[in-house]
Image (tube, coloured by chain):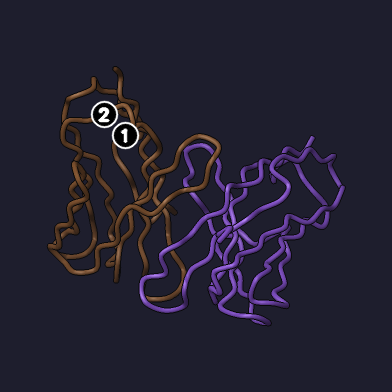
Chain colours: A brown, B purple
Amino acid sequence: TQLLEQSPQFLSIQEGENLTVYCNSSSVFSSLQWYRQEPGEGPVLLVTVVTGGEVKKLKRLTFQFGDARKDSSLHITAAQTGDTGLYLCAGALGNEKLTFGTGTRLTIIP
Amino acid sequence: NAGVTQTPKFQVLKTGQSMTLQCAQDMNHEYMSWYRQDPGMGLRLIHYSVGAGITDQGEVPNGYNVSRSTTEDFPLRLLSAAPSQTSVYFCASSYKGGTYEQYFGPGTRLTVT
């Protein structure tokens, strides 16, 4: 059973467009992380959110943690080709184990 | 700092062979873990360790062994490889406590024929 579902699984958009990807669960997480992974490399941490309703911005990327701490979203404004990659969310259930989502593979077309 | 290093980068095994995937980190992190990544499945936790001498099972531990004799090293052993173990394996480390933000190695792509 996958605790964290990400949608969409695949997304291909034109450079300059906006997009949102989602990470949903029926479980309550103590914190949630977003990672980006490029081909042939390991995931790299983008952000951690810990408080329900929290919003964090990283340049053109905006991350939001749901009020009930069961879901999160990642919004990218004016996408660039450098945003291409696999985006993974990961939730912590209050212990040292992280549960990763299924991933969203994003392709930005020049 | 080299961060998290993994060797080898690629490996092909025959069914029944054994091998050890190496992982080392130079950040003095207490927590280390092994994940496998398969298409459409995200990352699944195999084994983890919260410090030297302490290991525990993750979501998919069968067919894998680990040990943690030092803070720096956390090898993953496949005792008798099976085709179902064909995957990309990632080692990660983090500080113990807090939000366990993971630092990942570059991965090992393993094919079992």
Please state if B17 lies on the left or on the right of A101 as rendered: right
Q: Quadrant of the N terminus of chain B?
A: bottom right
In space, the residues marked 1 and 2 are separated at their CA atoms by: 5 Å
Amino acid under label 1? Asp
Which numbered circle lies on residue A80? 2
Q: Are marks 1 and 2 in contact (CB under 8 Å)?
A: yes
In which image quadrant can residue B51 be found? bottom right
Q: Residue at x 18, y 56 (%)?
A: A56
Q: Chain of mark 2?
A: A
Q: Label 1 is found on which chain of the structure?
A: A
Above or below, comparing residue A94 to residue A48 in the picture: below
Q: Amino acid at mark 2?
A: Gln
* Residue with the mark numbered 1: A83
Q: Residue A106: image x %, image y %?
A: 34, 31
Q: Residues within 10 Å of mark 2 (few under 14, many from 20)?
A: some
Residue found at x 39% / y 50%? A101
Q: Residue at x 73, y 65 (%)?
A: B65
- A94 or B10, nearer to the observer: B10
Residue A76 position in % (x across, y down): 20, 38
Choose between B75 and A103: the one closer to the eye.
B75
Q: Is residue A102 left or right of residue B19?
A: left
Q: Is residue B35 above or below residue B51?
A: above
